[in-house]
Image: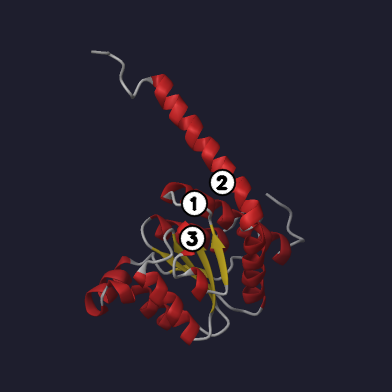
Amino acid sequence: MSDRRPDRPGDRLARVRASLEEAGRLQREMIEVAGGRVAEAAGLVIDVFRSGGRLLAFGNGGSAADAQHLAAELAGRFDRERPGLPALALTANSSDLTAIGNDYGFERVFARLVEAHGRPGDVVVAISTSGNSPNVLEGVEAASRRGLRSIALVGKGGGRLASRVDVAIVVPSDATARVQECHIAAIHVLCEIVDAELFPEKAEA
């Protein structure tokens, strides 16, 4: 029997290399297949902020964390000192989520919060690696009914969500981890464009 174990340091390094190379390859592919959509989404967010609107972001699990990441970069700061921007992650209040989930069902959590906080002229950013999360779909539908614009960050072909938003950024991968990595990259680029165009006079920190 061989004493070779699959978790030897050389095997681990090979896995690190393979994962990072695949992530890099996919981000390069994103430039061609979704770069224009990222730029379009950034333009929509800029228009919303210029008109006094807000950004509302939501998703489940890792996508909930990405929604909070996006809101933090905008409300806090990204790469330069500037005023905070009105961005809210609808995933951040556990009391909201559990109360609404308990009273109305988990599929209604984001729709109810969009109804509570969304106003015409705002924009929602819906994040779902599959594009088929029922509560994310219902959140986007609630946004449409209230006159909000919508952006989706999705993967795996876009699912049902991609066709229900104004701008869909679809990562060309079926691997959840790779899709989430590209979502973060897209979020950072979006924030960079927002900062540069809304606050060109602010020096980068």
Q: Are marks 2 and 3 in contact (CB under 8 Å)?
A: no
Q: Nearer the viewer, mark 2 or mark 3?
A: 3
- The amino acid sitting under disc 1 is Ser
Quarter of the rendering occupied by the N terminus: top left
Residue at the image position 40 percent from the left and 70 percent from the top:
136
Residue 157 has which mark? 3
Q: Secondary structure at mark 3?
A: helix
Task: Indicate the position of residue 161 as horizontal and vertical percent values.
Answer: 46, 70
Identity of the residue furthest to the right in this view: 201
Q: CA distance from mark 2 to mark 3?
A: 14 Å
Q: Nearer the viewer, residue 119 or 136?
A: 136
Residue 173 has which mark? 1
**In the image: residue 82, left or right of residue 110:** right
Q: Nearer the viewer, residue 162 or 95?
A: 162
Residue at the image position 44 percent from the left and 70 percent from the top:
160
Relative to 200, is 10 above or below?
A: above
